[in-house]
Amino acid sequence: MDFEHISVLLQESIEGLNIKKDGVYVDGTLGGAGHSKEIVKRLETGRLIGIDQDINAIEKATNVLNEFMSKVTIVHNNFKNIGIILKELNIDGVDGVLLDLGVSSHQLDQEERGFSYNKDSFLDMRMNTSQDFSAWDVVNKYTKKELERIIKDYGEERWAARIAEFIGAERQIKPIDTTGELVEIIKKAIPSGARKDGPHPAKRTFQAIRIEVNKELEILRESIINAVGALNTGGRICIITFHSLEDRIVKETFKELSLECICPPEMPICTCNKKKELKIITRKPILPSKNEIETNPRSRSAKLRIGEKV
């Protein structure tokens, strides 16, 4: 599987991991292996565990990391299962975890995957192509109320109700099978004046459907907690997000894990027995440089947050 891949916030995330030559590191979103290659190049007796649910990414990463395979283990799975994966590999703890969230460049560029609103293909959007549930199911089987909810909540789309209404009306005539058909419906639903400025009119709706298909936000908080639980003391977690919903979950989960106590303020003594697990390294997220944005426009919305296990 051949595709171009430009890793976002590459140097910043590698520096954030604070890599030790004999450490064990997990790249939970392997993708094109750009981050993984930079990690493994810094290892001597250490080990890299690369995880991805996309079989095409697994094939690409295996090729990219071929010369380093004595120090690499690649796993076809979802990063939410990091605890299970490490247990099966007899690894008690790791020194760093990297998560580069969202859709990757090769998934957008592969027309048949149905992620892009700029390419006409079957409504798919599955990161794990072995699962049955796809974007077609969301668009054609969800009630109008369910569609409105996910487009509003996951896409932060102000015209969610109209888009859901137009989708509902169109599928009464025939199923909506392709990304091109969906784009045209969205364009009809959004008033022309509202389409003059801002991003592509279908961007937010496509984002929302993709998140729903892959349950991206549902698994994120649990995945962060599991990843931090797998870290050795002093180990780092670096998470790159691409929209405000993801970043909010990362920020709030980091904060939750960094607290000593979560008892109500009026409690005279602590009864929650909570322990601080994480020190937040980045009080504000690290953003891509102007030069990176010019070189790789897809990095524009990226944010990197870093925490350290205590």
Image (tube, rainbow, N blue to C red):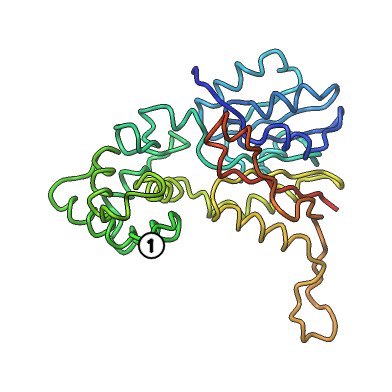
Looking at the image, residue 248 lies above or below residue 132: below
Tally of numbered discs: 1
Q: Nearer the viewer, residue 268 or 88?
A: 268
Where is residue 219 shown, x and y percent of the image? 56, 52
Where is residue 161 shown, x and y percent of the image? 30, 63
Residue most toward the top?
A: 67
Q: Is residue 10 left or right of residue 44?
A: left
Where is residue 200 shown, x and y percent of the image? 37, 44
Q: Amino acid at mark 1?
A: Arg
Q: Is residue 63 left or right of residue 266?
A: left
Res 293 quadrant in image: top right
Looking at the image, residue 102 lies above or below residue 149: above
Looking at the image, residue 308 lies above or below residue 87: below
Q: Residues within 10 Å of mark 1 (few under 14, many from 20)?
A: some
Say which residue appears at 35% left-offset and 34% top-offset. Answer: 118
Looking at the image, residue 265 lies above or below residue 167: below
Q: What residue did someone put label 1 on?
A: 149
Q: Nearer the viewer, residue 40 or 54?
A: 40
Say which residue appears at 52% left-offset and 49% top-offset. Answer: 216
Q: Is residue 231 left or right of residue 120?
A: right
Where is residue 75 shown, x and y percent of the image? 62, 30
Res 51 quadrant in image: top right
Say which residue appears at 30% left-offset and 34% top-offset. Answer: 122
Tell me the SS state at disc 1: helix
